[in-house]
Amino acid sequence: MSEAATTPNRSWVWQWLIGILLTGTAVFLLSRVISWEEFKTALGTIQPGRMILLVVVYLVSMVFRALGWQTLLQRKVSLGRAILGMNEGYFLNNILPFRLGELGRAFLMGRRTGMGTVATLSTVVVERAYDLAIAAALLLTTLPFFLKMDWARPFAIIVLIVIIAGLTALYLAARHREALEAWLERRLGHLHLLQRVFLPLIRSLLDGFSVLTRFEFFAISLGALLLSWGIALIRDYLVLQSLVPTAPFWWAMLAISASNLGGALPSMMASLGTFEGAATGAMVLAGARPEVGLVYAIVIHVIHLICSSIIGGIGLAQEGQSISQLLANLRSNR
């Protein structure tokens, strides 16, 4: 087998090994602090009727999230196709490490819209930047309610500043793309290989980021994501109220921000372990029992896994491409 063929395989092996290490560490730490008898008792407080309500609220939140991505795609697809495409990525995230499903949905949607993988991936980057900024803002908002997470303030502020600075830089790059492309051509003009490979890549990225220069698309996409987060907050509060009837609303704000920031870390497929570990740790620092944090995380995670796998599976079936073929395409596009 050639070196070109073995290098991607080695890369994927290392990704799996790192993911296993991080997930295994999170699971080990959780096992050391959880009382499984209390965990079973807490889990038993989630009634079937409440689970149905949580699924409905989750799906409504998903629709607004898909509306945000559809807008970032400059409405080149229907809302229904955006929902399917978004969940195709989630489904792939459920079975692949390191959130490689984001690349998968960019490839599939880029092929469908004709935008290409790179331009579509840039819309996913903007969506994730929105998410991180919102999560950091929520984390900052909850800090005055307790004193045990003073260490998180600098982290949240740094994340928020970096994301805002990044979005601003992307906006300026897209706004002044002609000047940027001219500057790059002058710099890379004598490097013909880089000019042929690098400049088309930059142009595709700027095509996707150009949505930030159109106020209507920017406002609607950000507004839809904010609504999606607001509805998700209601979902999370319903879970926490089932577990602790006196739970304050800021617990939900803390839990959703911490779990999303934790879920963004590299890990095994579906953010297993890191999502639960971040949520449980945040709840413990807020004063809740670790069992409450773990049950909350598992309920939210299971709803997401089941719904995204069903909807994403439907979307992939309509694509007419097997998962093995898609993985081969992803490897060749990386």
Image (tube, helix red, strand yellow):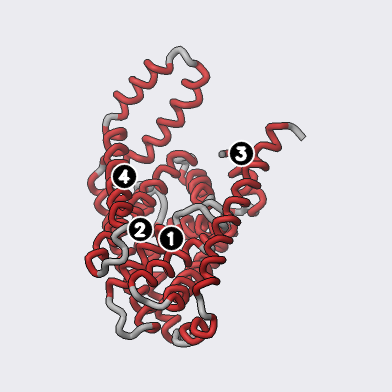
Which class describes the residues within 10 Å of circle 4: few (<14), some (14-19), or many (20+)? some
Please tell me which residue lies in front, 289 or 252: 289
The image position of residue 187, as x and y in percent, is: 39, 17
**Residue that carries the numbered disc 1 in the rendered image:** 80
**Quarter of the figure with the C terminus:** top right
Residue furthest toward the top? Answer: 190
User: Image quarter for residue 79?
Assistant: bottom left
Q: How many angstroms separate mark 2 from mark 1 (CA)?
A: 9 Å
Amino acid carrying mark 4 in the image: Val
Of the two numbered discs 3 and 4 in the rendering, the one whose residue sits closer to the viewer: 4
Q: How many angstroms separate mark 1 from mark 4 (CA)?
A: 33 Å
**Residue that carries the numbered disc 4 in the rendered image:** 162
Which class describes the residues within 10 Å of circle 2: few (<14), some (14-19), or many (20+)? many
Q: Name the residue: 50% across, 26% down.
A: 197
Which class describes the residues within 10 Å of circle 1: few (<14), some (14-19), or many (20+)? few
Up the image or down, 121 lies above or below 291; here it is above
The image position of residue 90, as x and y in percent, is: 50, 59
**Residue that carries the numbered disc 2 in the rendered image:** 67
Q: How many angstroms separate mark 2 from mark 3 (CA)?
A: 30 Å
Up the image or down, 318 lies above or below 330; here it is below
Amino acid carrying mark 3 in the image: Ser
Q: How many angstroms separate mark 3 from mark 4 (CA)?
A: 31 Å
Amino acid carrying mark 1 in the image: Gly
Helix, strand or loop status at disc 2: helix
The image position of residue 328, as x and y in percent, is: 64, 45
